[in-house]
Image (cartoon, rainbow, N blue to C red):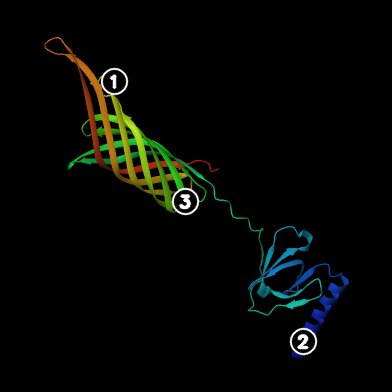
């Protein structure tokens, strides 16, 4: 039995070598243990896979074979590569497409509506809690390591005054964690704005709001374009209000008076927003 087996192996090998010779060595031949013959171009021999292209479609996809299913390879130059016999396993042929190149990272454009609540201001051991609302646009660079956020905000001020204000903040930020589902970053935010004119003040009323904050920022993504955001801001604010008015004294003389108020204070806010990513470009 053993001699017959060896004779069959030898005849089997000689048979396919002769076939290759007569075919003009036009292609590689892969002989499966199941006696199936595959013609093509062997691209790579891996530890457990043999990768080749079909002879009728050399520019097409690559095909992977389990190495344990292959008996031998006869190259077009006549060289024979006999695969070691591995543990018997069901024959499996897997067709895979050419690996696609890694997509270039693209910029993110994020639009959100947000609220600052609470918004705490403190001066001389006195504190007040306010609220702010607004919307924001953030541009994240390729690779999402850097972002630039623009945030117009309306805030209720209840500290030495009781009016609404508006300001526009610009915040560059650097993301330590760059990928979804969660980003985490640090940033700085500077803003400038003004109070809405109180009803009791003259028409020459002027105001200025300037602030600077250190930001801890997070982005929480879903599989869709939905985006949630939580930020904590710590910093200082500077307020300035001024106007002038005139009145008449007891003697009928006109008097001009100027009012100037300046306030510097510490502020803290927790900003929560909801929005989405626009189409990437």
Image quadrant where one finds the C terminus? top right
Tag 1–tag 2 contact (CB < 8 Å): no
Q: How many marks?
A: 3
State whether residue 1 appears in this view: no
Secondary structure beneath dot 2 equals helix
Secondary structure beneath dot 3 equals loop
Q: Position of residue 248 (x, y in %)?
A: 16, 12
- Counting residues from the start of the chain, the first of labels 1 and 3 encountered is 3
Secondary structure beneath dot 1 equals loop
Q: Is residue 262 left or right of residue 193?
A: left
- Counting residues from the start of the chain, the first of labels 3 and 2 encountered is 2
Q: Nearer the viewer, mark 1 or mark 2?
A: 1
Residue named by callout 2: 6
Q: Residue furthest right?
A: 22
Q: Residue at x 36, y 40 (%)?
A: 190
Q: In 3D space, how far apart are the residues under numbered discs 3 and 2 (Cα atoms)?
A: 65 Å
Q: Residue at x 78, y 70 (%)?
A: 29
Image quadrant where one finds the N terminus? bottom right
Relative to 171, does residue 11 appear above or below in the rendering? below
Q: Residue furthest top?
A: 252
Residue named by callout 1: 204
Q: Position of residue 272 (x, y in %)?
A: 35, 43
Relative to 208, does residue 4 appear above or below in the rendering? below
Q: Is residue 244 left or right of residue 176?
A: left
Q: Residue at x 79, y 60 (%)?
A: 56
Q: Position of residue 81 (x, y in %)?
A: 74, 77
Relative to 69, does residue 95 appear above or below in the rendering? above
């Amino acid at each position: 039995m053993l001699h017959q087996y060896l004779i069959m192996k030898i005849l089997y090998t000689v048979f396919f070598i002769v076939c290759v010779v007569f075919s003009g060595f036009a292609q590689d031949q892969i002989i499966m243990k199941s006696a199936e013959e595959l013609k093509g171009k062997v691209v790579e021999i891996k530890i457990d896979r043999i990768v080749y292209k079909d002879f009728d479609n050399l520019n097409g996809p690559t095909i992977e074979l389990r190495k344990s299913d292959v008996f031998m390879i006869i190259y077009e130059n006549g060289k024979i590569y006999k695969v070691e016999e591995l543990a018997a396993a069901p024959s499996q042929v897997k067709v895979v497409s050419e690996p696609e190149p890694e997509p270039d990272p693209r910029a993110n454009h994020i639009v959100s509506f947000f609220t600052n609540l609470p918004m705490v201001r403190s001066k001389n051991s006195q504190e007040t809690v306010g609220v702010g609302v607004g919307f924001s646009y953030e541009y994240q660079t390729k690779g999402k390591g850097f972002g630039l956020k623009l945030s117009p905000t309306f805030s209720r001020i209840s500290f030495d005054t009781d009016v609404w204000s508006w300001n526009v903040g610009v915040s560059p930020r650097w993301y330590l964690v760059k990928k979804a589902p969660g980003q985490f970053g640090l940033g700085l935010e500077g803003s400038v704005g003004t109070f809405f004119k109180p009803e009791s003040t003259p028409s020459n009323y002027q105001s200025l709001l300037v602030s600077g904050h250190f930001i801890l920022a997070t982005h929480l993504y879903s599989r869709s374009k939905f985006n949630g955001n939580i930020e904590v801001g710590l910093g200082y604010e500077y307020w300035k209000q001024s106007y002038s008015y005139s009145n008449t004294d007891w003697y009928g003389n006109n008097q001009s008076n100027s009012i100037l108020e300046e306030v510097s204070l510490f502020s803290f806010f927790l900003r929560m927003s909801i929005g989405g990513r626009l189409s990437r470009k």
